[in-house]
């Protein structure tokens, strides 16, 4: 009888401890999410009133005048992110594939070491490197140098994600392809890469999201421009640099546009990250 009475007490005690633990976890999770909510709410309340059609289709107005937009900065950011993706994504995928499939090779170990180093390099240092190797020899700020700096930032993210995803693919798939007589390169590209394409796309989106919000490398490479750029060999406007320029200016109108640009940039990065999460969830199902 005593054992029968003791069992509900133990269950209630366990249930109470579980509730306390879940409550503590929820509190700490809320504390982690709270800064993000506060930042996004403040940017939304400050930038949303300034968003209109002119912001997306017009050039910046002269200093001290009202109106204008950031159409050239948006176009410049899209241009450089696309160019950097073309530079970084294919070699990043191949690098991650090689490290994952040939981990015992000396070259794979060297590549992994270099990728880890690149991941920890501050973006401003990458900007200085691009300035010394591309801006100075070419004789001025240009869009190509900015794209190259962003590509260096994207490359380790794509490579590392590809490596980790391909390691999770069962070895039986490789063995089945080889057993059918397929060459090794066809097994890797047509079976292994296809099997992990959704998860790999997640890493690509994360790399694009990180490159989209970088400011420091572009200050040393593409610089800025208040007009439409017609050549990749001249300075090009970008949304992060335009926001920085407007934020430190003494003009209230530029401050207003800076908040609107911040809202657009944060929304783009948030959307890209959300898309990556959706792809990752779909690949895991």
Image (cartoon, rainbow, N blue to C red):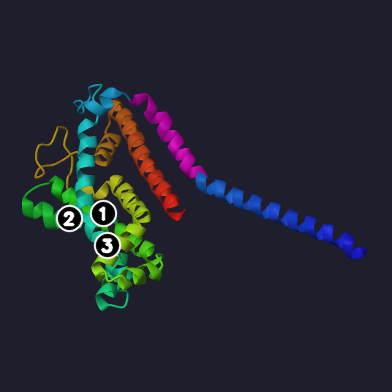
Q: Distance between the residues labelled 2 and 1?
A: 10 Å
Which dot, 3 or 2, sits closer to the camera?
3
What residue lies at 31% left-to-right and 78% top-to-bottom? 104
Circles 2, 1 touching at the beta carbon (< 8 Å): no
In which image quadrant can residue 50 be found?
Answer: top left
The circle on residue 189 is: 3
Taking the magenta stretch, the answer to whether it contains residue 49 is: yes
Q: Is residue 278 above or below residue 185?
A: above
**Local crowd at mark 1 within 10 Å, few (<14), some, or many (≥20)?**
some
User: In the visual, does 85 lie left or right of 166?
Assistant: left
What residue lies at 19% left-to-right and 28% top-to-bottom? 59
Which dot, 2 or 1, sits closer to the camera?
2
The circle on residue 124 is: 1
**Where does label 2 land, which residue?**
130
- Who comes first in sequence, dot 3 or dot 2? 2
Q: Give the range drawn in magenta.
A: 34-51
Q: Where is residue 177 in the image (x, y as percent from the top left)?
A: 32, 68
Camera-side residue of 85 and 152: 85
**Local crowd at mark 3 within 10 Å, few (<14), some, or many (≥20)?**
few
Q: Distance between the residues labelled 1 and 3?
A: 35 Å
């Amino acid at each position: 009888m005593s054992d029968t009475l003791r069992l509900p007490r133990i269950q209630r005690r366990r249930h109470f401890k579980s509730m306390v633990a879940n409550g503590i976890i929820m509190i700490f999770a809320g504390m982690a999410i709270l800064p993000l909510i506060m930042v996004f709410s403040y940017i939304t309340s400050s930038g949303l009133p300034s968003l209109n059609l002119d912001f997306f289709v017009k050039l910046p107005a002269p200093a001290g005048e009202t109106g204008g937009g950031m159409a050239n900065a948006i176009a410049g950011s899209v241009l450089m992110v696309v160019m950097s993706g073309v530079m970084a994504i294919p070699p990043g995928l191949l690098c991650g594939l090689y490290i994952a499939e040939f981990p015992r090779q000396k070259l794979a170990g060297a590549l992994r070491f270099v990728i880890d180093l690149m991941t920890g390099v501050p973006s401003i240092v990458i900007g200085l490197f691009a300035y010394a190797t591309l801006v100075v020899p070419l004789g001025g700020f240009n869009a190509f140098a900015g794209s190259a700096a962003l590509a260096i930032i994207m490359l380790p993210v794509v490579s590392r994600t590809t490596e980790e995803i391909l390691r999770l693919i069962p070895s039986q798939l490789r063995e089945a392809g080889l057993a059918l007589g397929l060459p090794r390169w066809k097994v890797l590209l047509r079976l292994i890469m296809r099997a992990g394409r959704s998860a790999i796309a997640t890493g690509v989106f994360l790399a694009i999201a990180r490159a989209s919000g970088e400011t420091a490398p572009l200050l040393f490479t593409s610089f800025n421009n208040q007009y439409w750029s017609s050549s990749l060999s001249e300075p090009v406007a970008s949304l992060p640099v335009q926001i920085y320029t407007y934020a430190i200016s003494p003009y209230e109108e530029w401050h207003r546009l800076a908040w609107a640009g911040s809202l657009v940039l944060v929304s783009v990065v948030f959307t890209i990250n959300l898309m990556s999460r959706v792809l990752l969830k779909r690949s895991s199902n």
